[in-house]
Amino acid sequence: MKRVLKCLFVMLVLALCVPLALMPVAATGILPGDTDGNDKLTEGELADSIMAYLDVTYLGGSADYLELDELRDAAHVYAYWNGEPMRITDMADREATFYRPVKRVVCTASNIVRVAIALDACDRLVGIDQCSHPGNKRMDPLCFNSPVCAEQLCGGRLVELPDTGSSVGPRGHQIHLQEELIMSLKADVIFLTSDLYADVTQEKTGIPVVYLRSSGYMFEDVCESAEIMGMVLETEGEAEERLSFIKEEVNKISNITSQIPDSDKPTVFWGWTQCSFESTVGSNSVTLDRAGAINVAKDIPRGWGSVTKEQIIAWNPDIILVGAGSSNEAAAIRLKDVLDDPVYQNMTAVKKGDVYLVPLVHIAGSPQDINLFNLIYLAKLLHPEEFEDLDVEEEGNEIFKRFLRVDGLFTEYVACNADWLRVRLDEQQKS
């Protein structure tokens, strides 16, 4: 009879573990209910924990027991993790170990926040980097100064989240994390974009750290980041849906452009950073390749690099692309700087007027939605006949919706930041 009762109690708590409670539970290196500490929660241990809880709660017992939220965690571990810790290998081949379901998340870069939103984890975010706060005067890479986005993105709760610091930058970039604040938030995981500081941060905070290279230059990096975060958050279904969408969008373009002979592809120079037009994308850019262009700077061995004006003139590309910056004013200034530069006046692209703005300064992998849109936008810009039926604005809205879960956000982004893009989109629709 006692065993039957235990089994009934186990079934009861298993039913309670879906959905998971989002109350914070202090992270430890021991599975909840694993009384012998051997990293294996058995049915007997779970049943004993339930019986102890009932005994103390309802019968006035005095034994040690787990709180209800801890019992839910234990039931989840037993039902979904086979009673063992969840071990995840991140993009630096590090292993992060989780002893409880991840309910409280800190993201240290806007690209990582984007992935969390895409995977429907808004309600788990407890700390984000400064740039991910909608309305940030210095940079707003999530909402692009759109009040509609700020009100709707994650139900408007991002504005209220604390700034827990940033890990943006290439390998070796110094990070600035509010470690004590993160610990006070009882975070279950820290998603970091600096592999060099991952182990140090984990040691200081005692919180599992997962390194994601979502700011990399390849669509493949974006996909792998989403896949790993999906495993940590146990939202693999959402991750797979987003990955399938990315692959479909990329294939929609590359299946056509891959059939275009190189002799029919324009040579392109892409000047993209806010600081210098002469900074360009290099060998890691798959956006230009898949859009059906020949990147004149493809031999630059890194994801980006600086070149001289003399080198650009020597390349003499058919088309010049200029990163627009983050506002209408910035776009106008950047375009004028190129078109009015006396050094460039004899270049083919300048003479023919084939100098075009491209959304934002992000071109080679981050942020993910803008990068994916750029692929669509460039394909139609470079090969209008092959993509005559492609509705770029419709594609943009669908891409933004998949990543940020807000309807009509791309159209809103254009209205807030890119008059030049509004004109371009309208011209494409008429042609």
Image (cartoon, rainbow, N blue to C red):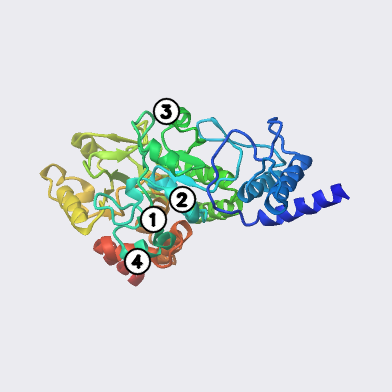
x, y percent for residue 356: 26, 54
Q: Secondary structure at mark 1?
A: helix
Q: Look at the numbered discs 1 and 3 and tell me whether their residues touch, using CB distance below 8 Å.
A: no
Amino acid at circle 2: Leu
Picture quadrant of residue 231? top right
> Mark 4 highlights which residue?
148
> Mark 3 highlights which residue?
196
Distance from label 1 to label 4 (Cα)? 13 Å
Q: Look at the numbered discs 1 and 4 and tell me whether their residues touch, using CB distance below 8 Å.
A: no
Q: Earlier in the sequence, mark 4 or mark 3?
A: 4
State the residue in front, 255 or 105.
105
Distance from label 1 to label 3 (Cα)? 28 Å
Crowd around label 1: few <14 · some 14–19 · many ≥20 (10 Å): many
> Mark 2 highlights which residue?
125
Q: Earlier in the sequence, mark 1 or mark 4?
A: 4
State the residue in front, 382 or 334.
334
x, y percent for residue 176: 34, 35
State the residue in front, 363 or 179.
179
- Image quarter hosting the C terminus: bottom left
Q: Look at the numbered discs 1 and 2 and tell me whether their residues touch, using CB distance below 8 Å.
A: yes
Amino acid at circle 1: Leu
> Mark 1 highlights which residue?
158
Residue 274 visible: yes
Distance from label 1 to label 2 (Cα)? 8 Å
Q: Secondary structure at mark 2?
A: strand
Residue 387 visible: no
Amino acid at circle 3: Leu
Q: Earlier in the sequence, mark 1 or mark 3?
A: 1
Between circles 4 and 2, the one closer to the viewer is: 2
x, y percent for residue 339: 16, 51
Amino acid at circle 4: Val
